[in-house]
Amino acid sequence: MERIRERLFSIYNNQNVEITYSYIMKAIHQTKQKPLKMRKQYWDEKDVVLITYGDQFKEQQQPALQTLKKIYDHYFSTVFEIVHILPFYPYSSDDGFSVIDYKEVSPVMGNWEDIQQLSASARLMVDLVCNHVSAKSEWFQEYLKGNPVYRDYFIEVDPTVDLSGVTRPRTHPLLTKFTLSTEEEKHIWTTFSEDQIDLNFSNPAVLAEIIDALLFYIEQGAEYIRLDAVGFIWKEIGTSSIHHEKAHNIIKLFREVVDEAAKGTLLITETNVPHEDNISYFGNGRDEAHLVYQFPLPPLILYSIHYGDASALSKWAKSFPHMGKETAFYNFLASHDGIGLNPIRGIIPENKIIEMAEALKKEGALISYKKNEDGKDVPYEINATYFDALNRKSDEEALRIKRFLVAHSILLGLPGIPAIYIQSVLGARNDYDGVKKTGAARSINREKYWLGDIEQELLQSGTVTNQVFQEMIKMIGIRKAEPLFHPNAAMKMLDYGESIFAFYRINKSKEQILLLHNLANQSVVLPVVGHYCNILTQQNIKFEESVELEPYQFFWLKPID
């Protein structure tokens, strides 16, 4: 309890600390009095996450969350124990990430009872969009009306102030001009868009509001809380306003709050930044995020398969820090966003990043750009489904699926908790119609489906959706049954040449499993000797001198004594 007070002092010094402390402690007490869902205290190899929108699947005159539960219970419940439902709150833009009301469910999706019903089938991850709110939110609308309660909820900045040192994730202006009800004009800090108004965490009342939302989600059944864009939450003119010490202290405060209110609730930070900055959100391994996104992984695997060269991926993987039992990486290949390129800057030469982006653009991907300090436009995000990003227009379906599966074998094999986006589970293709409808490049990987249509694709033998789904659930099932895939089991990298990504997973008893991946479009012979069971096929294989891997072939080999 005292740690919460100390953390508040580290953020605000003496400014309203006791008032805020009393509010937080009362809120925690109220949450603890609720009949909370039991929480798993530590993760294991069975923890695999499905990422999906709440309205991913549609039926006529049916709340979308009820349809999601129906398809989850029928197809996914034995595969994915955890479901990350992307923002299901009322919103005004960005497919949910411009939240109008933190404590409401969008009427199109259903209500809190639907969320609770889904939480009875799955462990839920929900988003706390803590950096900003919608311009249509009550908070901001009241600010525009001059309501003194909301006077300091947002950040007013003189437009003549030099903000050139602020880290910019987008190319649009950092400040947006708004007119108050008094006709007075104010320039407001808007990091991501003019519809996403940054919150002013230097006001303790804002922090209290966000903690209130955090505890509310726990009461509704959430066991994982994803802290969206959390690296930006503390602004200080004259700094980059990203990864600020006080931003870290706020996350540490969130950790104290969830540990006190509902131990076993996990915090995951979404910070799409270079590796060293990203892992700083682990804190000391016990006091900040439980999980951080492994952001270099999607572009690194894409790069490795694109060039048939795993050397950069292998070198990067060798640098993995070993995680204690209270922290783990959150591994993914695809998400509702595009494939970010910034996390591999410094790992991959800039000219190769640009070359790959241009090559993928010719194959149908959309590329989002940002301006460098020198004024040049450089690619920062590839917009495509991961299935299409890995492949070329001229490829046959069998080759497409092989590339896709070898990428997901790596995802499922690495240390950490794997998360798979619904579009990947379905082997989705680029949705150009969606881009036309919204004008947003990210819509290419956000297609929504009528339930009857997608069930037909899932069940019809030979469709890409059916083949990808069947192979994916088979791999996940095998992973979940093998304790050597515990998220914190050690990894040892092997060097078998540039096209091979190979490693052992090893437990404390020195048991091990060998994972071999050929990322090139040609066969490779490896000097592997021994007697193994390929647990993917349950075949026993004895290698006298070597093993040959066909293009994009992979093995999960467990030694036989």
Image (spheres, helix red, strand yellow):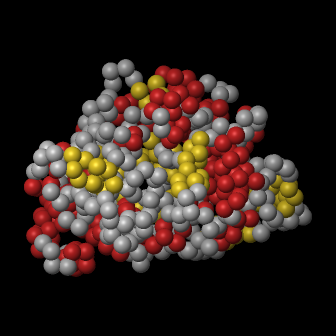
Left or right: 404 with respect to 543? left
In depth, the one of 97 and 114 nearer the eye is: 97
In depth, the one of 173 and 533 nearer the eye is: 173
Q: Quadrant of residue 424?
A: top right
Residue in view at x 70 percent, y 59 percent: 351
Query: Is residue 286 placed above or below 115 in the rendered structure?
Result: below
Left or right: 273 with respect to 177? right
One can see residue 242 in this view: no
Location of residue 137 in the rendering, given as x and y in whole percent from the top left corner: 23, 44
Q: Quadrant of residue 303?
A: bottom right
Query: Is residue 461 placed above or below 485 in the rendered structure?
Result: above
Residue in view at x 28 percent, y 45 percent: 134
One can see residue 204 in this view: yes
Residue in view at x 87 percent, y 61 percent: 546
Location of residue 477 in the rendering, given as x and y in whole percent from the top left corner: 57, 48
Query: Is residue 263 placed above or below 37 in the rendered structure?
Result: below
Location of residue 252 in the rendering, given as x and y in whole percent from the top left corner: 32, 71
Query: Quadrant where the N terminus lies?
Result: bottom left
Left or right: 296 with respect to 358? left
Farthest residue in the right direction?
A: 545
- How many numbered marks are there? 0
Location of residue 505 in the rendering, given as x and y in whole percent from the top left corner: 64, 66
Residue in view at x 85 percent, y 50 percent: 522
Query: Quadrant where the C terminus lies?
Result: bottom right
Q: Quadrant of residue 311?
A: bottom right
Farthest residue in the front direction?
A: 160
